[in-house]
Image (tube, rainbow, N blue to C red):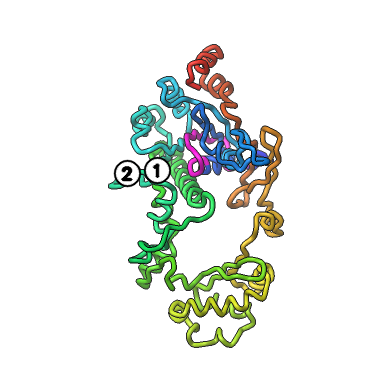
Amino acid sequence: MGTEAHAALPGVRVLEYGRLVAAPYASKLLADLGADVIKVEDPGGDPARKCGPFPEDRPHPENSGLFLYLNTSKSGVTLNMDSAEGRRLFGELAARSDVLIEDTPPGQMASWGLDFATLHEQNQRLVMVSITPFGQTGPCVHYKAHALTTFHAGGEGMLLPNGSDYVARPPVSLPGFAHDYDCGMTAAVAGLAALYHARAAGRGQHVDISRQEAATAFMRQEISEYVATGVVSSRGKAASYHRDVAPCKDGYVTVHFINDKEWEAFTEVMGNPEWAKSDRFKDVAGRRENHREMMQRLAEWTCQHTKLEIYTRAQVLHSPTGAHLTPDELLASPQYAARGFFVDMTDPQGHAWRVPRGPCQFSETSFAVRRPAPRLGEHNDAVLCGQLGLLRETLARLRQTGVV
């Protein structure tokens, strides 16, 4: 576990009402940077509690690896937002917060009397970060969408698809919740920018995070390439000439050669074979046009070596090449060990977990898992009685009536 000695956000108060990955990950990043985060769950709990993985594959709402990772360093309370009293208490918590992160459908918070305009009247400095599929305004605002939908709608899934290639081929997805983590990171960074502004100007603002636009933000390279050259990248098309996955003896490596210098570096990794000197591969245009042949010839070499042999040689020769590691190989990676990327965590049930410490490290502050994720309603007494001043008799009544 880390400590608060070098926290970046001490004294920052964050309220989270989010489910599964994007919103909880956004607030987790702030919590692990030292912010005081209160996570509000419905009495039935965040759906992530049912997702696992679970120790010994035995489902339990307090043992989900996904939930435990996404909610480190937070306090946890339960509130029934369908009840007037639950919404009132939520409003009181928002009035004491610097940042509110939520992922309800557009219009939901307003129907509860908890929209930004209402909350801002009570707390002029509040920054409200709302995460929805297509944002708070626009023609698609009320469309329902799965993460796969917004992943492709933003272009990230199809690399700016075009024509029959998009229609004829089924949609693909990255493993796990990759798009949701991207969206959560976007929300956290935008929320921090708005918090910085609020501290300077004395007024908060409503940050509108569209999952679709968050996906598009990760398409900077492809968008810039289209603007500069007119090349439209698309899955299965030769426009993916500058990066690909190649098989090797014990798995796969990803190879990159966006420009001539990177191509020359990888040809040196391969020992400068004669075929790589062909005019067909001498420049970007040639490698794009002859991409399939290039990758077939390249694979003939990579299949003679292990992924770590290729990766190690590529690092020495400054070729941006990555090995595809299994989970066990990832945990044993000397690079991650040297960075202290993984830290040990014990959950409230006594299970030991190894989790990533944070996406980056800073020179004067750092991410730190300060405490495990909260049990369902673990801090109801401390927050609702200690911070809001409820009498314990009142809290007991709220439990009996299903408000908490």
Q: What stretch is highlighted in magenta?
A: 7-24
Type of residue at label 1? Thr
Q: Real-space Cα distance between discs 1 and 2? A: 8 Å
**Mark 1 crowdedness (10 Å alpha carbons): few <14, some 14-19, many ≥20:** many
Nearest to the observer: residue 32 or residue 233? 233
**Mark 2 crowdedness (10 Å alpha carbons): few <14, some 14-19, many ≥20:** some
- Residue wearing tag 2: 141
Seen in the picture, residue 252 relative to 97 is either above or below; the reply is: below
Type of residue at label 2? Val
Whether the magenta-drawn stretch holds residue 172 is answered as no
Question: Percent from the top left, x then y, of residue 162?
Answer: 35, 65
Nearest to the observer: residue 33 or residue 186? 186
Residue 143 left/right relative to 403 = left
What label does residue 132 carry, if any? 1
Seen in the picture, residue 340 relative to 386 is either above or below; the reply is: below
Sequence-earlier tag: 1 or 2: 1
* Residue displayed at 40% across by 58% down: 155
Seen in the picture, residue 325 relative to 312 is either above or below; the reply is: above
**SS for callout 1:** strand
Residue 341 left/right relative to 383 = right
What label does residue 57 carry, if any? none
* Residue displayed at 52% across by 69% down: 244
Whether the magenta-drawn stretch holds residue 18 is answered as yes
Task: Kindly check if marks 1 and 2 are in contact, taking CB atoms under 8 A apart as contact.
Answer: yes
Seen in the picture, residue 301 relative to 64 is either above or below; the reply is: below
Question: Percent from the top left, x then y, of residue 217?
Answer: 42, 56
Question: Percent from the top left, x then y, of residue 176?
Answer: 54, 50
Which image quarter is the N terminus in? Answer: top right
**SS for callout 2:** loop
Asked where in the image residue 220 lies, by quadrant, the reply is: bottom left
Nearest to the observer: residue 169 or residue 304? 169
